[in-house]
């Protein structure tokens, strides 16, 4: 079983969510880079401190790299020191969550609510006002500056 298959079986049983945008694996491979495919479709994780989005400070929105759904406003981004772009709150109706057991304990996975692409995980050690840390893979997102949004 490949890594993508392992992640799919490591997710919570009964996770049968249906998404607005669906494609076959071959269709996703045609529109995503190999790195994007590994993270968004295979539930991979990019290397810490490797994403240019860690340093993105302009006003705008961070959107899903697979379907361009806006996910996070730049105002909610902060430096968590973890090496991945982090946010304290997603945009309304932008993300969904499920439970994964890849590390043999439950974690809350975050995915794009429109295409189901894996984005990262959410933890309860973030700043106020939410106390959440949405720890996202930069390769799973694109940045759209305010002047283009």
Image: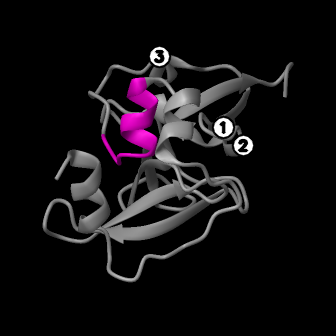
For the record, the magenta segment spans: 34-44
Task: Give the labeled residue for mark 2.
Answer: 70
Q: Establish if 141 lies above or below 108.
A: above
Magenta span: chief secondary structure: helix
Q: Disc 1 on helix, strand or loop? A: strand
Q: Disc 3 on helix, strand or loop? A: helix
Residue 78 in view in this figure: no
Q: CA distance from mark 1 to mark 3?
A: 14 Å
Task: Give the labeled residue for mark 3.
Answer: 52
Q: Which mark is residue 148?
A: none
Q: CA distance from mark 3 to mark 2?
A: 18 Å
How far across and down, in percent of the image, does residue 69 sit? 71, 44
Nearest the eye: 1 or 48 = 1
Q: Disc 2 on helix, strand or loop? A: strand
How far across and down, in percent of the image, does residue 16 sit? 49, 76
**Residue, x 32% and y 76% (percent of image)?**
12
**Residue, x 35% and y 71% (percent of image)?**
99
Nearest the eye: 142 or 76 = 142
**Disc 2 + disc 1, Cβ < 8 Å:** yes
Residue 81 in the figure: left or right of residue 117: left
Residue 55 in the figure: left or right of residue 57: left
Task: Give the labeled residue for mark 1.
Answer: 63
Location of residue 101 (image quadrant): bottom left
Tag 2 or tag 3, which sits nearer the N-term?
Answer: 3
């Amino acid at each position: 079983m490949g890594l993508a298959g392992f992640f799919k079986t490591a997710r919570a049983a009964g996770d049968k969510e249906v998404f607005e945008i669906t494609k076959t694996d071959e269709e996703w491979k045609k529109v995503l880079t190999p790195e994007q495919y590994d993270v968004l479709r295979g539930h991979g994780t990019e290397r810490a401190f490797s994403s240019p989005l860690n340093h993105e400070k302009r006003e705008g929105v961070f959107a899903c790299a697979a379907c361009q759904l806006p996910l996070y406003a730049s105002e909610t981004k902060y430096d968590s020191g973890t090496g991945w772009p982090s946010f304290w709150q997603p945009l309304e109706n932008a993300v969904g969550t499920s439970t994964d057991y890849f590390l043999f304990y439950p974690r809350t996975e975050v995915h794009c609510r429109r295409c189901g692409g894996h984005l990262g995980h959410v933890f309860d050690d973030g700043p106020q006002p939410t106390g959440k840390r949405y720890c996202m893979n930069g390769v799973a997102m694109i940045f759209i500056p305010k002047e283009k949004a």
